Image (cartoon, helix red, strand yellow):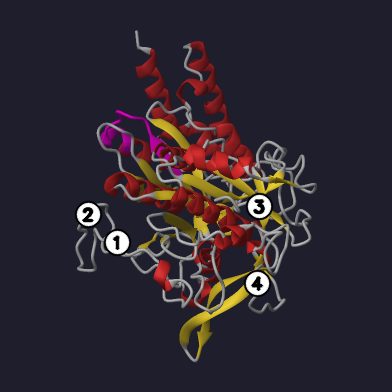
């Protein structure tokens, strides 16, 4: 008599034996597939081996995202193999699908299951593939390679020096009670954030910008010599890494890396230099780039790599990376990305994320990555300068944590000038702009409270929020960012 495991493997092997399994254009074939799938489910249920017994992740949420039309790379799947599976097992899954292995997103070391990026044959039905793979004993979960975009919109209004309302407090000059109150911390002498690092997972950073250059990290463990000196898999990652272009050039997008440069200026624009803007942290803080958004946006595979890059830097070298800024969103549920954020939490890194710009209630309609339940996530909604919740800002009484300045935020950008890139400034709006105010506040708090862990910093940020009518019942804290005591 066949064991449950042997019989279930045989059934699934037969299910995968036809490489055109997922060709949705062949109705007869699809009818046969549906019949086979029903037969597999029935037999597995009889044996006590339902799909749920094999499936990890959230195949229901993944398929729901696909049905809702969430953006993803056509024909691509991220497959996380179960711990203990062999290379032969994994290759069997790939061959059974007729898939091409594009990349290893996370290596399987010490018996851990590998995460691989696969491309299915043209015309593949991703939802069907997810359903079948969820019942495969060698697969922990499978999901699309979702795509993401930054969460900002350009604002045509021009601003001069003194228009940084997002940094003001009610007791500063100029004053705005709905600002982050960072200027009150500056007035108390707290402008330096030495010893603190923040990761910017976004587009790249124009690292030569006049108001940023002094606050860009230089990797002391991997100098530019063509050798991966620290063994992290990234050669000469002297300022971070470009996961979209797979290079060490964190400004490979040139003048189009405006969004990543803009959020960087809000976190760490050099202050007190009589030029341009000032970030929440004027000096001392160092920014590390995890560039994964390119001209067409970014993918789950590269987002996972970027998150893990910062986790590895902290665990490998003991760097005091207190937070990553994540002003982006889109796509559907990803167990792989949630797991990466969980690894960052284990390392003590906050994941500060934009709530999104559709004006929707995130309690009702999940928005990722801010909606993941990980304890280290701080989800941020956007305020306008008059204290109202920005019309575009997503919110959620249980899923969004705090409001922060997000409309008409003036910050650093690269600009094209006579065929070269130069330092410039621009006003943008979005929850993308609110998020770095909170990331900067996290760095400011960490610098004045050495040894504070991620949970303590998050608690301080939410606990000091100023009650705000427009945020009441819309975010967990019922209020807006207040960095005055940081």
Taking the image as shown, residue 126 lies to the left or right of residue 167, namely left
Q: Where 94 sits versus 122, above or below?
A: above
Q: In the depicted view, which residue is nearer to us: 300 or 67?
A: 300
Label 4 crowding class (10 Å Cα cut-off): few <14, some 14-19, many 20+?
Answer: many
Comparing marks 2 and 4, which lies closer to the viewer? 4
| Disc 2, SS | loop
Give the residue pinned by disc 1: 219
The mark nearer the N terminus, 2 or 4, is 2
The circle on residue 173 is: none
Residue 4, how many percent across, how many down? Answer: 39, 14
Q: In the depicted view, which residue is nearer to us: 214 or 350?
A: 214
The circle on residue 230 is: 2
Label 2 crowding class (10 Å Cα cut-off): few <14, some 14-19, many 20+?
Answer: some
- Residue at the outermost bottom position: 418
Residue 209, how many percent across, how many down? Answer: 46, 76
Q: CA distance from mark 1 to mark 4?
A: 31 Å
Give the residue pinned by disc 3: 356
The mark nearer the N terminus, 2 or 1, is 1
The mark nearer the N terminus, 1 or 4, is 1
Taking the image as shown, residue 159 lies to the left or right of residue 284, namely right
Q: Which residues are magenta?
A: 78-90
Mark 2 and mark 1 residues within 8 Å of each other at the beta carbon: yes
Residue 397, how many percent across, how many down? Answer: 72, 38
Q: CA distance from mark 4 to mark 3?
A: 18 Å
Q: CA distance from mark 2 to mark 3?
A: 36 Å
């Amino acid at each position: 008599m066949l064991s449950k495991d042997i019989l279930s493997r045989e059934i699934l092997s037969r299910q995968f034996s036809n490489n055109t399994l997922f060709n949705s254009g062949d109705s007869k074939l699809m009818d046969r597939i549906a019949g086979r799938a029903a037969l597999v489910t029935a037999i597995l249920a009889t044996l006590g081996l339902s799909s749920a017994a094999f499936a990890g992740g959230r195949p229901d949420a993944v398929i729901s995202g696909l049905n809702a039309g969430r953006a993803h790379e056509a024909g691509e799947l991220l497959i996380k193999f179960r711990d203990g599976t062999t290379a032969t097992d994994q290759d069997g899954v790939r061959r059974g699908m007729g898939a091409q292995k594009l990349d290893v997103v996370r290596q399987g070391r010490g018996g851990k299951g590998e995460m691989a990026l696969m491309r299915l044959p043209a015309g593949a039905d991703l939802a069907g593939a997810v359903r079948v793979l969820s019942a495969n004993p060698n697969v922990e979960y499978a999901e699309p390679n979702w795509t993401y975009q930054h969460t900002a919109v350009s604002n045509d209004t021009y601003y001069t020096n003194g228009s940084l309302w997002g940094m003001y407090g009610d007791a500063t000059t100029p004053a705005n009670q709905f600002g982050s109150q960072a200027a009150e911390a500056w007035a108390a002498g707290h402008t330096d954030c030495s010893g603190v690092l923040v990761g910017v997972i976004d587009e790249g950073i124009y690292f030569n910008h006049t108001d940023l250059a002094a606050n860009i990290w230089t990797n002391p463990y991997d100098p530019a010599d063509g050798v991966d000196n620290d063994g992290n898999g990234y050669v000469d990652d002297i300022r971070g890494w470009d996961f979209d272009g797979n290079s060490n050039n964190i400004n490979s997008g040139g003048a189009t890396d405006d969004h990543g440069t803009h959020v960087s200026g809000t976190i760490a624009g050099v202050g007190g230099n009589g030029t341009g803007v000032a970030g929440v942290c004027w000096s001392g803080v160092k920014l590390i780039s995890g560039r994964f958004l390119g001209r067409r946006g970014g993918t789950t595979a590269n987002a996972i790599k970027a998150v893990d890059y910062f986790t590895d830097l902290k665990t490998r070298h003991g760097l005091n990376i207190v937070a990553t800024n994540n002003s982006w969103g889109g796509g559907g549920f990803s167990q792989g990305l949630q797991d990466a954020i969980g690894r960052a939490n284990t390392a003590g890194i906050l994941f500060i994320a934009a709530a999104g710009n559709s004006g929707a209630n995130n309690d009702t309609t999940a928005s990722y990555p801010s909606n993941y339940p990980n304890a280290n996530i701080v989800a941020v909604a956007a305020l306008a300068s008059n204290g109202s919740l920005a019309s575009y800002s997503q919110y959620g009484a249980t899923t969004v944590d705090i409001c922060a300045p997000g409309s008409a935020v003036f910050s650093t950008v690269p600009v094209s000038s006579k065929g070269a890139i130069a330092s410039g400034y621009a006003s943008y709006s979005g929850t993308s702009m609110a998020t770095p105010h909170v990331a900067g506040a996290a760095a400011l708090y960490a610098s004045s409270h050495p040894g504070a862990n991620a949970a303590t910093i998050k608690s301080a940020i939410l606990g000091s929020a100023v009650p705000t009518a427009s945020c009441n019942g819309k975010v967990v804290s019922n209020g807006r960012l207040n960095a005055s005591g940081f």
